[in-house]
Amino acid sequence: MVGKTQGRKRGRPRKYCSDADGLPQSTMCGSHPRGGHLSLSDAVQMASRGEAETRTETENSTEMIIVTPRGESESLPFVKSSPAWKAVQSMQVFQKFPQNPHFLPLTEYRKSFREGMAIGHMVTFANVVEEAFRLKITDPVHSFMTCLEALQDLEPHGFHVNATKARLTKMLSVIEQLQKLHNEHVEVEGRISELTSENDEIVEEIVKLNEKIRNLQDELACAASKKENKDSEITALRESLAAISASIQSIELDFEDAT
């Protein structure tokens, strides 16, 4: 149609990131909220919700897709003429995950752009899948979310992404579980450290009390020894007093008898 713009009819086309060498990466720009990263729980919820929404959109859109049985070129919104298709379709990813995208959303673009954009989508899909299966649970959460968002953008073009999305969503769930266990581990370790510190203070107090007890026991033994000495002295004095009293009584009796 004359006067048709180069962009989409509705909204702006997504921008694909590239590395320092100008090669397409497995990520897409503009997918993350500005001003910080998503929390892990939010990421898992978004991944699960996005997978469900994409499934619904795919089910709803399949009724609108009409593929003619007269060959692949009849069902595509462009004619495959670029020699790049052979190299792209021979990539290892497409041997493991065969794809037959219809690229119907490209009908919103000029015909001269469609084949190049389709090749770009194929390369992006390959890069995203390779990245998804290269990710480890120790990688940042936003790396998983970027891959999921890219797959969600590619799925309307007819790419089969369920296996890759399932892997990413499962790994996000595992990361969330590990994060919760890690938080519990840190919390328990902190409580153990706190109780250990309190226990050390109690042990120190017990040591001081035992020392006081030993000192009191020494004082008690000393006091008991002093009492024993005093008792012995008192006993000796009482015996002496009794002897003196007996002597007095004897003298008085002798004096009375003499008179």
Image (cartoon, rainbow, N blue to C red):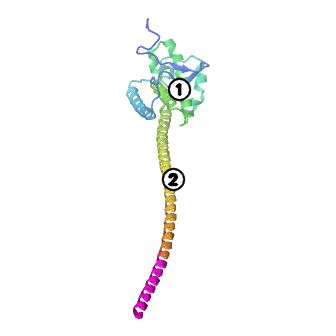
N-terminal label among 2 and 1: 1
Q: Which residue is mark 1?
A: 125
Image position, residue 113 (x, y; %): 51, 13
**In this picture, residue 129 sits left or right of residue 156:** right
Q: Which residue is mark 2?
A: 204
Q: Which SS class for mark 2?
A: helix
Which residue occupies the foreground of this view, 202 or 92? Answer: 202
Query: Compared to 193, does 88 lie above or below?
Result: above
Q: Residue at x 54, y 18 (%)?
A: 80
Q: Residue at x 48, y 39 (%)?
A: 179
Q: Quadrant of the N terminus?
A: top left
Image position, residue 28 (x, y; %): 51, 23
Mark 1 neighbour class, 10 Å CA radius: few under 14, some 14 to 19, many 20 or more: many
Q: Which SS class for mark 1?
A: helix
Foreground disc of the pair 2, 1: 2
Please state which amino acid type lies under the numbered disc 2. Answer: Glu
Q: Which mark is residue 25?
A: none
Residue 249 inside the magenta-drawn segment: yes
Q: Residue furthest top?
A: 2
Q: Are marks 2 and 1 in contact (CB under 8 Å)?
A: no
Which residue occupies the foreground of this view, 123 or 175? Answer: 175
Q: Quadrant of the C terminus?
A: bottom left
Residue 252 inside the magenta-drawn segment: yes
Place residue 34 in its image quadrant.
Answer: top left
CA gap, disc 2 to disc 1?
66 Å
Image position, residue 157 (x, y; %): 47, 24
Q: Residue at x 52, y 29 (%)?
A: 143
Please state which amino acid type lies under the numbered disc 1. Answer: Phe
Image position, residue 164 (x, y; %): 50, 33
Magenta region: 234-259
Q: Residue furthest front?
A: 259
Query: Compared to 180, does 219 lie above or below?
Result: below
